[in-house]
Image (cartoon, grey):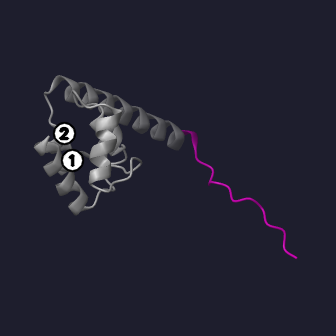
Amino acid sequence: MAIKTPAQAPLRSLDQRMEALARANDIRVRRAQLKKDLKLGTVQIEDILHDPPEYVSTAKVFDMLIAVPKFGRVKAARLLNQCRISQSKTVGGLSERQRTELVQLFNQR
C-alpha cells in the first residue's frame, strides 16, 4: 500500500512572491478606482462587460454590477438570474452570449 503525501505548491523565490504581491496590489487599486468611476458614472458598465480590461477579468460580475449607481444586491442578483449567470461568475469567464444578453438586459432597465 502506497502512502500518499500531500501535494505542495512549488516553492517560490522571494522575488517571485514580491512580484506576485505587487501585481495583486496593482489589480486591487485599479479595481477600486474602476468601482469609484462606475459610481460616479464616468465609466459605463456596458463598456466594461463588452470589452473588459485585463485587471477586471478575475473580478466577479456581481461585484461590478453592485458598484453601479441605483444597483444593489437584489437588482444585481435578479439581473444575473434572468441571464442564467451564477453570482460567482467572473467577468473574464462570461461567454459571448452571456456578455451580450447581460448588456442588453442592463440597457433595458
Say which residue appears at 36% left-offset and 49% top-offset: 90
| Residue 37 falls within the magenta-colored stretch | no
Instruction: Check the picture and name the quadrant holding the C terminus.
Output: top left
Residue holding disc 2: 45
Read off the magenta span. Answer: 1-14
Q: Position of residue 76 (x, y in %)?
A: 30, 39
Q: Amino acid at mark 2?
A: Ile
Residue 19 appearing in the image = yes
* Nearer to me, 30 or 34: 34
Residues at badges 2 and 1 in contact (C-beta under 8 Å)?
yes
Chief secondary structure of the magenta portion: loop
Answer with the quarter of the image where residue 68 lies.
Answer: top left
Residue flagged by tag 1: what amino acid is it? Answer: Leu
| Of the pair 97 and 48, the residue shown nearer to us | 97
Residue drawn at x 40%, y 38% as measured from the top left: 23
Residue depicted at x 38% and y 51%: 89
Q: Viewed as shown, does residue 52 lie left or right of 29?
A: left
The image quarter in which residue 83 lies: bottom left
Tell me residue 102's x, y (percent). 21, 51
Count all numbered tags in the image, as a single digit: 2
Q: Secondary structure at mark 2?
A: helix
Q: Residue at x 31, y 31 (%)?
A: 72
Q: Circle 1 sits in a helix, a strand or a loop, which is it?
A: helix
> At which x and y percent is residue 44?
14, 36
Quarter holding residue 30: top left
Residue hosting label 1: 49
37, 103: nearer the viewer: 103
Report whether 71 appears left or right of 6. left
Marks 2/1: CA–CA distance:
6 Å
Image quarter where the N terminus lies is bottom right
Query: Which label number is shown at residue 83?
Result: none
- Residue 29, given in percent of the width and then of the height, sits at 34, 29
